[in-house]
Amino acid sequence: MQSWRRAGQSLLALALARAEFASVELTLAAQAALRWLLVALATCVIAMLALFALSAAVVVALWDHFGWYPLGVLALLYCGATALLVAWLLRSVATARPLLADTFAELAKDGAAIRSSAALPQASDDASAG
């Protein structure tokens, strides 16, 4: 009976360790995601300001010769760049590593170790019976 109690305590300790590992992994993922989001937003704001200034300079410089055509060309360029970025983002999200992958891998190892250690006493019992 004592061995069952120790086994239960060991399994509980293992489960708690894995839960703590998952918690740490989730915290790190959340921090990284927030950092990426903030950098991406700051980058977008700076890029938009630069594009507004550059667009205004191009349109003012070409307005006398081409009228509104530079605005159309710039709009098409911006739409094309947006489409490329959206395609890249969707591809990146689709190929991203699953959340808690390390935790699930460790849990699978633990399960395999428990199953293999549970199979050992049966094999020795069978050998002694034969």
Image (cartoon, helix red, strand yellow):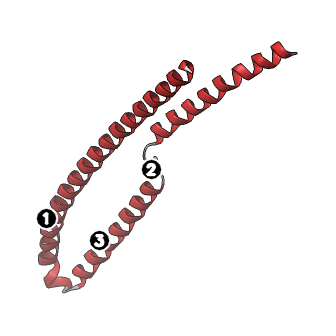
| Residue behind mark 1 | 49
Q: Which residue is drawn at 60% across and 26% down?
A: 113
Q: Residue 76 carries which label?
A: none
Disc 2 from disc 1: Cα separation: 30 Å
| Residue behind mark 2 | 96
Residue 21 drawn at (x, y percent): 38, 34
Q: Residue at x 56, y 19 (%)?
A: 3
Q: Looking at the image, is 130 positioned above or below residue 49?
A: above
Q: Is residue 10 left or right of residue 56?
A: right
Of callouts 2 and 3, which one flags the residue occurring earlier in the amino acid sequence?
3
Q: Is residue 6 left or right of residue 33?
A: right
Q: Which residue is drawn at 43% across and 28% down?
A: 13
Q: Which of 92 and 21 is in front in this view?
A: 21
Q: How crowded is mark 1: few (under 14 residues within 10 Å), some or many (20 or more)?
A: few
Q: What residue type is labelled 3?
A: Tyr
Of callouts 1 and 3, which one flags the residue occurring earlier in the amino acid sequence?
1
Q: How crowded is mark 3: few (under 14 residues within 10 Å), some or many (20 or more)?
A: few
Q: What residue type is labelled 1?
A: Leu
Looking at this rendering, what residue extends furthest in the bottom direction?
A: 67
Task: Report the quarter where the C terminus lies.
Answer: top right
Q: Nearer the viewer, mark 2 or mark 1?
A: 2
Q: Residue 78 carries which label?
A: 3
